């Protein structure tokens, strides 16, 4: 299997190009899935999907799941409202061999079958 992050922010999976409205920032191969983190700069901050910018694909490039709403928010500096905190990193926790999503100041474990989040750890 050949997977490559292209310069235009899309993913080449065995010659099939996978694109999203946002650029792909990073990907990891984990077990039999491809997990990607989308760049959040071009998403409207009020969009509830802002905090759900990690997705999983099968080996054919089909969407399996989108990470669940994790509940972490930040204060919008331009308005009196809270907005979902986007993920800024993605990887595999080497200690427990589980998917890890990184938010500002928090790391969470991501279930590879459902996209559920658990075990938040403050990371300062």
Image: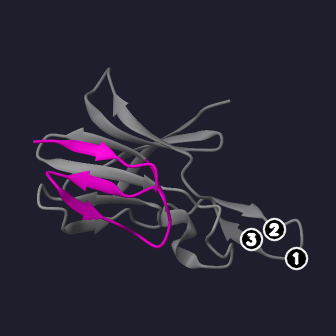
Quarter holding the C terminus is: top right
- Cα–Cα span, label 2 and label 3: 6 Å
Picture quadrant where residue 86 is located? bottom right
What residue is disc 1 on? 79
Measuring from the top left, give residue 63's x and y in whole percent. 23, 68
What residue is disc 2 on? 76
**CB atoms at circles 2 and 3 under 8 Å apart?**
yes
Q: Is residue 65 above or below residue 46?
A: above
* Residue 100 visible in the shown view: yes
Task: Answer whether residue 39 is magenta in the image.
Answer: no
Q: Nearer the viewer, residue 93 or 13?
A: 13
How many other residues sit within 10 Å of disc 2, few (<14), some (14-19) or many (≥20)? few
Which segment did they paint magenta? Answer: 1-25
| Residue at 38% in and 49% down | 6
Task: Answer whether residue 8 is magenta in the image.
Answer: yes
**CB atoms at circles 1 and 2 under 8 Å apart?**
yes
Measuring from the top left, give residue 75's x and y in whole percent. 80, 64
Of the two numbered discs 2 and 3 in the rendering, the one whose residue sits closer to the viewer: 2
| Residue at 60% in and 79% down | 47
Q: Regarding mark 1 in the picture, which secondary structure is present there?
A: loop
Looking at marks 2 and 3 on the same chain, the residue that comes earlier in the sequence is marked by 2
Q: Regarding mark 3 in the picture, which secondary structure is present there?
A: strand
What residue is disc 3 on? 82
| Residue at 32% in and 20% down | 95
- Cα–Cα span, label 1 and label 2: 5 Å
Q: Nearer the viewer, residue 103 or 42?
A: 42
Of the two numbered discs 3 and 1 in the rendering, the one whose residue sits closer to the viewer: 1
């Amino acid at each position: 299997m050949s997977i490559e992050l292209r310069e235009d922010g899309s993913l080449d999976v065995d010659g099939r190009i996978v694109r999203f409205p946002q650029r792909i920032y990073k990907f990891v191969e984990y077990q039999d899935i491809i997990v990607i983190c989308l760049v959040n700069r071009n998403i409207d901050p009020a969009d509830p999907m802002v905090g759900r910018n990690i997705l999983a694909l099968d080996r054919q490039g089909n969407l399996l799941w989108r990470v669940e709403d994790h509940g972490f928010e930040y204060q919008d500096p331009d308005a009196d409202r809270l907005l979902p905190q986007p993920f800024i990193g993605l990887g595999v926790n080497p200690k427990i061999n589980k998917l890890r999503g990184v938010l500002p100041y928090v790391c969470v474990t991501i279930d590879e079958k459902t996209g559920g989040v658990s075990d938040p750890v403050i990371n300062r």
